[in-house]
Image: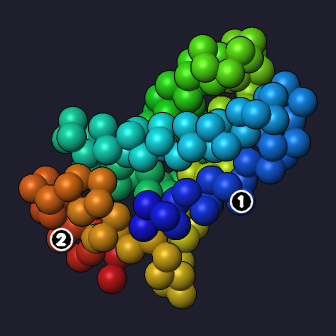
Amino acid sequence: MLENLLNLVKENTQTDIVNNPAVPDKFNGDAIQETSSHIIDGLKSQLSSGNMGGLMGLLNGGGQNVATNPIVGQIISSLAGSFASKFGLSESQAQGIASNVVTKVMSQLINKVNDPNDNSFDLSSMSKELGGGGIGGMLGGVFGNLFK
């Protein structure tokens, strides 16, 4: 699942990172990896803090605009700060890139999670990988039962 997420990030960074003159070419790979890490860490933090309802609402699509979801907002903010400090981007450039990329990736992730014909993101496996067993295993059972 994490490899699938990295591929999803790579697919959605061509315009905003790779072809963006604000991001020096030497940082493209690092910026893509940073994006993946922040998305994964953001989802993990929701599990570890017990925000199961918020995470389920996000992954269900919940009828809410992905860009205005507080979980997505936290990931965007964290990633933007990292982009500004690590890659020398202005705050506005970093915020714009992070917002575009994270919103695209999360929208596609939600679509894939909710598509019964796409098994690239199985919520049971996803929650186990993100949670590392324990609460992840418990959530895997909950997610698995909700989406089967």
* Residue at the image position 79 percent from the left and 29 percent from the top: 23
Foreground mark, 2 or 1, reads: 1
Which quadrant of the figure contains the C terminus? bottom left
* Residue at the image position 23 percent from the left and 53 percent from the top: 131
Q: Are marks 2 and 1 in contact (CB under 8 Å)?
A: no
Q: Amino acid at mark 2?
A: Gly
- Secondary structure type for disc 1: helix
Residue matched to label 1: 11
Q: Please report whichever mark, 2 or 1, sits nearer to the chain's N-terminal start.
A: 1
Answer above or below: position of 92 versus 43.
Answer: above
Answer above or below: position of 60 versus 95.
Answer: below
Residue 41 is left or right of residue 90, and the answer is: left
* Residue at the image position 81 percent from the left and 28 percent from the top: 24
Q: Can residue 145 be seen?
A: yes
Residue 127 is left or right of residue 77, and the answer is: left
Q: Quadrant of residue 139?
A: bottom left
**Residue 54, image x and y in percent?**
34, 44
Residue at mark 2 to residue at mark 1: CA–CA distance: 30 Å
**Residue 128, image x and y in percent?**
24, 62
Residue 136 or residue 53, whichever sits in front = 136
**Residue 36, image x and y in percent?**
53, 46
**Residue 73, image x and y in percent?**
52, 31
* Outermost bottom residue: 117
Q: Amino acid at mark 1?
A: Glu
- For label 2, the crowd category at 10 Å Cα-Cα, with few meaning under 14, some 14 to 19 and many 20 or more, is some
Which quadrant of the figure contains the N terminus? bottom left
Q: Quadrant of residue 43?
A: top left
- Secondary structure type for disc 2: helix
Q: Quadrant of residue 27?
A: top right
Residue matched to label 2: 141
Answer above or below: position of 74 versus 18.
Answer: above
